[in-house]
């Protein structure tokens, strides 16, 4: 694991506008459409309202899109010969995989954060503050 | 099918070696084995006393590969920073860019760089671990004349610092201008191995063409390595054209004699053609 390499790769992913649109903006937009603007948003659902329920769902959806898309891009990178370039360095295949997993998990934070911020600023409510953090962590693919 | 067969080479420190050969001669396969990308079925590859992979991970080796191998969406400098971060010890990023002649376009995105610029970037990456051995696989493929010229100027500077350089090329001129030693590969084995001068001498065959009466059988001429008969016209290759010409004109019915001197290029072409025929 190498911090500089991982940070650069992370920044690279964030700069990919098209990819980030599907990872973060689309789940946020879907959340607004179905979780904020509808009549059912304020109705109760378990320990929160329907809006909060949909917020968790859309955040999860975004996080999964993020990890899947980065797994795909890792394959493309290797096909393009970047793997050969890396083979000339001390970083082995396992190092590459670990780096990509960390980058994928880091990128997966973005949709969760974006959707939750939108939810917080609009109609999502939960019974306790800790539930926000617990569901947020649960939407993230790592735990 | 063996891409490389029975190749034994010893390259000493500080040597500059050109690997010449037609497409499919096994140049890239041989270089891949030196780089530890593939393993020979039999035999060993040793780089400074280590296995190829060990030598790579210790940074003894730097390689410029033919194509690909770069990420399009980052800048030249970012590419060097990323790769540099993977080495425990490496030359400063800006120095690598400077030495490879890539400083002027360091901020440009890789996808916007010309072929020559991308090759300079690959060269900068190869320089990062300050390798003792540089392996270049057709480093100037796809460059125009000017870019090729500049690239070799940069390489000259690196080689004069005592690095060992092994490069594969199609261009005879590059081998001639830059290498001290030329290894000619053909069908996966070494066809010729020697200094540029010895290569030139070995290939300095002359061609003697003459007319010969079709009814008369051809005798064995001394010093002739290759004889080709097309109707009345005979083509003979020899190292000593004068001797053959003297013999032909004084003691045989040969007439209309022509002597042509083949260069490096001709020897190489002849070799490629022979490979294609067989």
Image: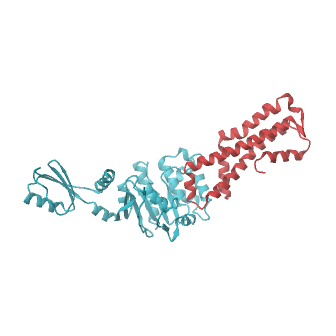
Chain colours: A red, B cyan
The answer to whether residue B74 of the structure is visible from this angle is: no
Q: Is residue A43 left or right of residue B266?
A: right
Displayed quadrant of residue A35:
top right
- Residue extending farthest to the top is A39
Residue depicted at x 50% and y 53%:
B120
Residue A84 in percent (x, y) is at 55, 55
Residue B118 in percent (x, y) is at 51, 50
**Is B3 above or below relative to A70?**
below
Residue depicted at x 75% and y 40%:
A61
Q: Is residue B264 left or right of residue B223?
A: right
**Is B44 above or below relative to B70?**
below
- Residue extending farthest to the front is B1
Residue A102 in percent (x, y) is at 70, 53
The answer to whether residue A64 of the structure is visible from this angle is: yes
Q: For the image shown, how many numbered marks are present on the structure?
A: 0
- Say which of A138 and B11 sits in front: A138
Residue B5 in percent (x, y) is at 41, 61
Q: Is residue B81 left or right of residue B139?
A: right
- Residue extending farthest to the right is A127
Q: Quadrant location of the N terminus of chain B?
A: bottom left
- Residue extending farthest to the bottom is B49
Q: Is residue A22 left or right of residue B152?
A: right
- Say which of B142 and A64 sits in front: A64
């Amino acid at each position: 694991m190498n911090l500089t390499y991982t940070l650069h790769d992370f920044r690279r992913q964030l700069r990919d506008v098209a990819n980030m649109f599907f990872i973060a903006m689309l789940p946020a937009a879907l959340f607004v459409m179905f979780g904020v603007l509808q009549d059912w948003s304020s109705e109760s659902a378990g320990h929160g309202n329907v809006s909060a329920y949909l917020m968790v769902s859309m955040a999860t959806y975004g996080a999964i899109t993020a990890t899947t898309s980065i797994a795909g891009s890792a394959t493309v990178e290797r096909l393009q010969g970047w793997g050969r370039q890396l083979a000339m360095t001390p970083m082995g295949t396992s190092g590459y995989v670990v780096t990509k997993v960390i980058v994928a998990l880091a990128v997966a934070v973005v949709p969760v954060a974006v959707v939750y911020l939108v939810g917080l600023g609009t109609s999502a409510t939960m019974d306790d503050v800790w539930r926000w953090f617990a569901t947020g962590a649960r939407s993230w693919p790592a735990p | 099918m063996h891409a490389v067969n029975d190749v034994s080479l010893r390259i000493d420190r500080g040597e500059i070696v050109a690997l010449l050969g037609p497409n499919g001669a096994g140049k890239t396969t041989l270089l891949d084995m030196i780089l530890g990308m593939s393993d020979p079925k039999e035999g060993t590859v040793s780089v400074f006393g280590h296995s190829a992979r060990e030598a790579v991970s210790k940074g003894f080796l730097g390689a410029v590969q033919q194509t690909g191998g770069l990420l399009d969406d980052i800048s030249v400098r970012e590419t060097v920073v990323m790769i540099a971060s993977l080495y425990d010890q490496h030359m400063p990023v800006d120095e690598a860019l400077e030495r490879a002649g890539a400083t002027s376009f360091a901020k440009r995105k890789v996808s916007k760089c010309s072929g020559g610029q991308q090759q300079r970037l690959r060269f900068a990456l190869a320089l990062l671990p300050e390798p003792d051995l540089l392996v270049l696989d057709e480093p100037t493929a796809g460059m125009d004349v000017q870019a090729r010229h500049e690239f070799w100027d940069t390489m000259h500077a690196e080689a004069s610092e005592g690095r060992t350089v092994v490069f594969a090329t199609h261009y005879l001129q590059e081998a001639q201008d830059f290498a001290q030693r030329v290894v000619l590969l053909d069908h996966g084995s070494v066809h010729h191995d020697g200094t540029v001068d010895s290569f030139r001498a070995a290939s300095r065959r002359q061609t003697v063409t003459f007319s010969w009466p079709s009814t008369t059988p051809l005798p064995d001429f001394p010093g002739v390595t290759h004889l080709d008969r097309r109707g009345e016209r005979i083509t003979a290759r020899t190292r000593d054209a004068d001797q053959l010409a003297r013999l032909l004109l004084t003691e045989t019915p040969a007439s209309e004699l022509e002597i042509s001197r083949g260069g490096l290029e001709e020897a190489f072409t002849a070799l490629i053609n022979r490979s294609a025929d067989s």
